Amino acid sequence: MNRSPRNEKLSVDIESAFPGSGSALSDQFIEMHPELASLQGASTPPLLVLVPAYMAWCVRNSHRPEELVHDYTLNALAEFGRSKNPAIEHLNFKHLCSAKQQDVVAKFLSWCLDPTLLLHTE
């Protein structure tokens, strides 16, 4: 993990807003199922568990920008952000979040914009 103070603070913020998110899913599970949006189903944890677990994985693994988990997590958040109907259960993440949780998601998205993070050069 890139243990910058900014990463540490964001990890703490995610855990505070979404208790248990850092350990809700194993890194191995997330890496085997990189596409967050494809995990909808009866045996799947709820979005308030899934999404922050994937966000926490991204922060812990910012030193691995080649992993598709980063891209798929951002794509899922964009899709959830566009949803205007809270009745659509597989897209209602933003409608389930408290104001504090929405603030942490916004911090995560701002963190993702940092050009020194998630920069993959080949």
Image (cartoon, rainbow, N blue to C red):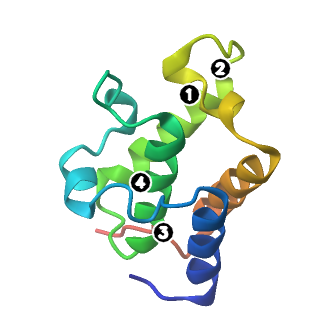
Residue 85 at x, y percent in the picture: 69, 12
Q: Which residue is mark 2?
A: 83
Give the foreground label among 4 and 2.
2
Q: Which residue is mark 3?
A: 59
**Label 3 secondary element:** helix
Q: Which circle's residue, 3 or 2, is located before the other in the chain? A: 3
Q: Are marks 1 and 2 in contact (CB under 8 Å)?
A: yes
Residue 21 at x, y percent in the picture: 48, 58
Which label number is shown at residue 70?
Answer: 4
Which residue type carries mark 3?
A: Val
Which residue type carries mark 2?
A: Ser
Q: Which residue is mark 1?
A: 79
**Label 2 secondary element:** loop
Residue at 61% over, 74% down: 12
Which residue type carries mark 4?
A: His
93 sits to left or right of 52: right
Residue at 42% over, 73% down: 60
Q: Is residue 39 above or below residue 41?
A: below
Residue 105 at x, y percent in the picture: 66, 51
